[in-house]
Image: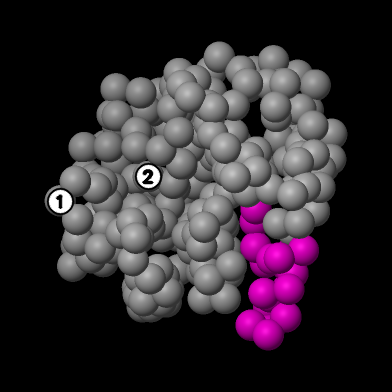
Amino acid sequence: MENAATRPEELLAEVEANIARICKPARREPSQVTLIAVSKTHPPERIVPLLEAGQRVFGENRVQEAQGKWPELREQYPDVELHLIGQLQSNKAEDAVALFDCIHSLDRPSLLKALAKAMDKAGRRVPCFVQVNIGDEEQKGGCPIGDVPAFLEKVRAADVPVAGLMCIPPADTEPAPFFALLAKLASDNGLKGLSMGMSGDYETAVQLGATHVRVGSALFGARAKP
């Protein structure tokens, strides 16, 4: 079902208004929440209206897809901030460091090694969220909860900037307990950044302290088929 407001700028205003509304009782400022417009699978012509409406932070799942559309868009909109929100293979680390301003899926020592090497080579430090396997799901990426403190030590020792923690709660379950757990983990480890919440649950995430929400279909409508 499509949103009642179908123009991208209206959808953007709607999401921003929802974030502001949720921030009020949570005693937070809307400026404390970064809205990442998830533009994966969407062509430039779907992205430009959001850029024209003032949105500047975008998220992509795949390095190759982002390479195909963002360099040209960035020539027109040089102040865009690009976040990699999907799983990253170690062999794509160099490309990711060259293209993205933030990486949300650092979850294992082999990837840390590849990213640190790529950052050294590029002379560029890209902030990374450590992805936590918050629901302890075998099929999902993410650092096991019990390994988070030790892994964060390794990340800091490698001189990779830690933006915070990221999670994707198990599907078809109430997300609030998982968001609360991620917030506690971040607090216990001295981190403020919390990348959590997507189109279906970003309001709950904001209520529980999200600093970055990754919103796709609520801004773009139904996802295009790859």
Q: Residue at 55% across / 14% down in the picture?
A: 68
Name the foreground residue: 119 vs 82.
Answer: 82
Q: Residue at 48% across / 24% down in the picture?
A: 225
Is 102 above or below relative to 66? below
**Residue 58 sits inside the magenta stretch:** no
Between the residue at mark 2 and the residue at mark 1, the CA separation in whole angstroms equals 16 Å
Number of other residues with Cα within 10 Å of mark 2, as a class: few under 14, some 14 to 19, many 20 or more: many
Q: Position of residue 33 (x, y in %)?
A: 65, 63
Residue of label 2: 105
Q: Residue at 19% across / 56% down in the picture?
A: 137
Residue range in magenta is: 17-37
Number of other residues with Cα within 10 Å of mark 1, as a class: few under 14, some 14 to 19, many 20 or more: few
Q: Secondary structure at mark 1?
A: loop
Residue situated furthest left in the rendering: 138
Three-letter amino acid code of the residue under disc 1 = Glu
Hey, which quadrant is residue 6 in on the image? top right
Q: Secondary structure at mark 2?
A: strand
